[in-house]
Amino acid sequence: MNIREKIKRWIELADHQDKQLARKHRIRKWIAITGMLAVLFILSFIQQLKPEFNHYSMPETQSGQTHACDSVSLSNNPFELPADSFEQLLKQKIDERNTD
């Protein structure tokens, strides 16, 4: 027997049993189920455990060392994304051609 057929038969059986209940009992049952799911959903956001953080200081760089981010020039255009080194070289070569 296929798994889909088993699931379909199980759902049909549950639906048939649900329809046999009185209207008030069916409404109470679904209110209880929905309420429990809502409580579980709300409880999933409440965490009693606090995360552990490792507080250590970053190693200081020596004054002679420079980082890659120090050498990147920032443009005045706020919509321009930072360029990688290949793009900077390409722009430099294009600018050199245009000045000739």
Image (cartoon, rainbow, N blue to C red):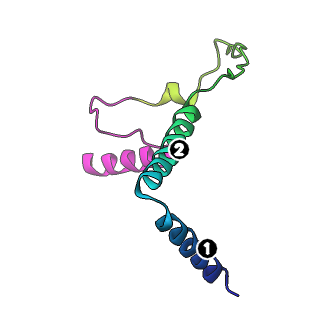
In the image, residue 34 above or below residue 73: below
- Within the image, what quadrant is residue 1 found in? bottom right
**Amino acid carrying mark 2 in the image:** Leu
Alpha carbon distance from label 1 to label 2: 21 Å
Tell me the element at label 1: helix
Q: Say whether residue 93 is magenta.
A: yes
Q: Is residue 100 left or right of residue 55?
A: left
Residue indicated by mark 1: 10
Where residue 70 appears, x then y in whole percent? 51, 24
Tell me the element at label 2: helix
Residue indicated by mark 2: 37
Q: Residues within 10 Å of mark 2 (few under 14, many from 20)?
A: few
| Camera-side mark, 1 or 2 | 1
- Within the image, what quadrant is residue 50 found in? top right
Looking at this view, is 7 or 28 the one in front?
28
Looking at this view, is 52 or 72 the one in front?
52
